[in-house]
Amino acid sequence: MAKFLTPLINEDLCEPYERFSKIHEPFIVADIKCLKDVNMQDTIEIPAGFCHDYESEGPFRGSCKRGGVVHDWASRIDAMVGMTKALAAKLYFEIMEASDAEKKNQSVVYRFGRWNRRWFKWGVVRIALGYWHKWYVLSTCYEMAEG
């Protein structure tokens, strides 16, 4: 299961970019199984300055910030050679699963709800249109807001 080597430290932005946030320090995730399974590097480092909108889809918006950031990064043109939309969705799912696994002593009902949420969110990013390979990793929030 994926391991978070650094905390996700963000800088939330003010108007007119309040829907965006910028990573303050590099965010590193290792032992990513879905990448290892396709013979890709299993550690990713999302650079400081990376602009993202966490999770922008559906009724569970923002419920897994680390998953949203990693998926936003994976969806960028220059994130990782060989990244596909299907693989980015698997990566998102795996990061959500790793985040949920950190929550200890949860009830069966709570765990089922999180499982259900992961599958719903995976489906949304797998079929959503319009965002894939639209921006570069270091695109600015201004570019994203205007484009």
Image (cartoon, grey):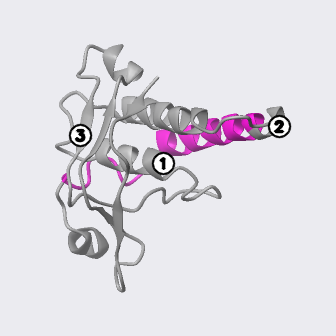
Kindly check if marks 3 and 1 are in contact, taking CB atoms under 8 A apart as contact.
Answer: no
Residue 45, which numbered label?
Answer: 3
Q: Main secondary structure of the magenta part?
A: helix
Q: Is residue 119 magenta?
A: yes
Name the amino acid, label 1: Ala
Residue 96's x, y, as percent?
53, 38
- Dot 3 falls on a residue whose secondary structure is strand
Task: Return the disc, 2 or 3, that comes first in the chain's sequence.
Answer: 3
- Identify the residue position indicated by label 2 in the image: 109
State the CA–CA distance, disc 2 to disc 3. 34 Å
> Which residue does the image show at 49% across and 60% down from the upper left?
56
State the CA–CA distance, disc 1 to disc 2. 28 Å
Circle 3: is it few (<14), some (14-19), or many (20+) Cα within 10 Å? some
Residue 140's x, y, as percent?
20, 67
- Whether residue 22 sits left or right of residue 130 in the image: it is left
Numbered range of the magenta stretch? 111-137
- Whether residue 130 sits left or right of residue 46 in the image: it is right
- Identify the residue position indicated by label 1 in the image: 128
Task: Return the disc, 1 or 2, that comes first in the chain's sequence.
Answer: 2
Q: Is residue 51 magenta?
A: no
Against 108, residue 26 (above or below) is: below
> Which residue does the image show at 48% across and 30% down from the upper left?
94
Residue extending furthest front? 105
> Which residue does the image show at 18% across and 30% down from the upper left?
81
Tell which of 130 and 34 is nearer to you: 34
